[in-house]
Amino acid sequence: MARIQLDIAHSYRANPRNDADYALLPMRQTFEDGGAYALLGPSGCGKTTMLNIISGLVVPSQGSIRFDQRDVTQLPPQKRNIAQVFQFPVVYDTMTVAQNLAFPLRNRGMDETRVRARVGVIAEMLDLSGQLDQRAAGLSADQKQKISLGRGLVREDVGAVLFDEPLTVIDPHLKWQLRRKLKEIHRELRLTLIYVTHDQVEALTFADSVLVMARGRVIQSGSPSELFEQPAHRFVGHFIGSPGMNFVPVNRLKRSAPGSSVGALIPPGAVTLGIRPEYLALGEPTPGEPIEMELLAARVQRIQDLGSSWLVSAQVESGESGAESVGDCLVRLRLARDADVPALNQVVGLKVFGPHTRFYDSQDQLIGRESEGALP
């Protein structure tokens, strides 16, 4: 296992001139020994580039990579003591499942008794014990990818295991099982695991710490609950959650409650209020109701039955004066299955102030918290 430290930047262009020329902008990042990490972000954000720099498949344009304080920047993958699992299965079709799993161990001269014992442990973890004598050529893509996962995990002395979207070809039901299985394997083996994905469910299920990336930067890193409850940037609030966080311009709030002291609840510099659909609630104006429960008027546009809950989409009303267009200020709220669901086109009051309300400044940064990475 290894503690991995990055102090790097990378461009695939020979002479980068501006930020847009970089796949990874200058960054410092540490992956602690034995941690389970996910690099999460949309296509082109730099997550696979970072993984390939860690593995040695790509040499960074600038900076260095250290494994346990040892500079490995110029070392090829085979000298970094890492294992990498790719998006598509990498197996030897002419070998059996057992031979495939054993290959990394035999390649390093491990005693045959230990090889068989280790293969047995990994096969049991991945539910491959009944297929050890089968040739890989006759197996499905799902099963072959399980072998690839097993080959990545079979070495006990590996510094880190790197996963590059390894569940892409996996059947959705098996994908759910393997995510849980990888989590269990990490708890048991305590390997340093780094997992690249664009799927937030995979990232939040697998990792103890998630690095949300965009435009070559790490925008925020933290536990799944931290990213959900305290998005440091509007991008994180939008990207994490299904659906993502609601954002309402602050001027809509001030105009929606004329004569109230709603402005006292809004911090200086705030231009946008953010609240997740799970925390947005319906309410009716009540005489004497505390200001924390001030309501925002919105007209119901859509109601979706999600089985276990309802998802209601509503357009924020323009306010009493009607002088300003609300544009695309659509908000969504999730209601319990047994809740009273409003009717289409009904104007409802939304409770937007509470302990889960967040505010963002003109740079889309969370007010009251230092951001780890700023988007231009």
Image (spheres, rainbow, N blue to C red):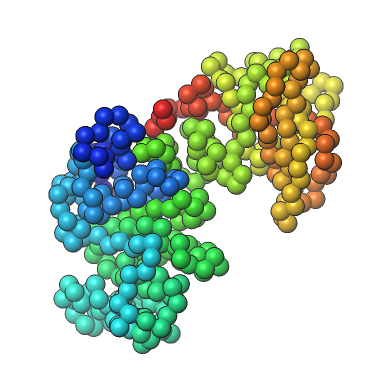
Q: Quadrant of residue 137?
A: bottom left
In screen coordinates, is 258 left or right of 263? right
Give the x, y percent position of residue 64. Answer: 19, 42
- Residue 188 can be seen, yes or no: no
Residue found at the far bottom of this picture: 133
Q: Is residue 299 left or right of residue 271?
A: right
Left or right, 79 with respect to 10, comes to left
* Picture layout, residue 273 above or below residue 333: above
341 lies left or right of 333? right
Please report the residue visible at 49 percent of the width from the left and 52 percent of the height from the top: 199
Where is the N terminus found, in terms of image quarters?
bottom left
Residue 184 position, x and y percent, is: 44, 64
Nearer the observer, 272 or 5: 272
Q: Which residue is situated farthest in the top direction here? A: 259
- Measured as percent of width and height from the top left, residue 260 is found at 74, 15
Q: Please tell me which residue lies in front, 195 or 355.
A: 195
Q: Residue at x 48, y 33 (%)?
A: 232
Across the whole image, how many numbered discs are drawn on residues?
0
- Residue at the image point whose x is 39% and y is 43% from the top: 45
Q: Is residue 123 above or below residue 366?
A: below
Does 133 sit above or below residue 142? below
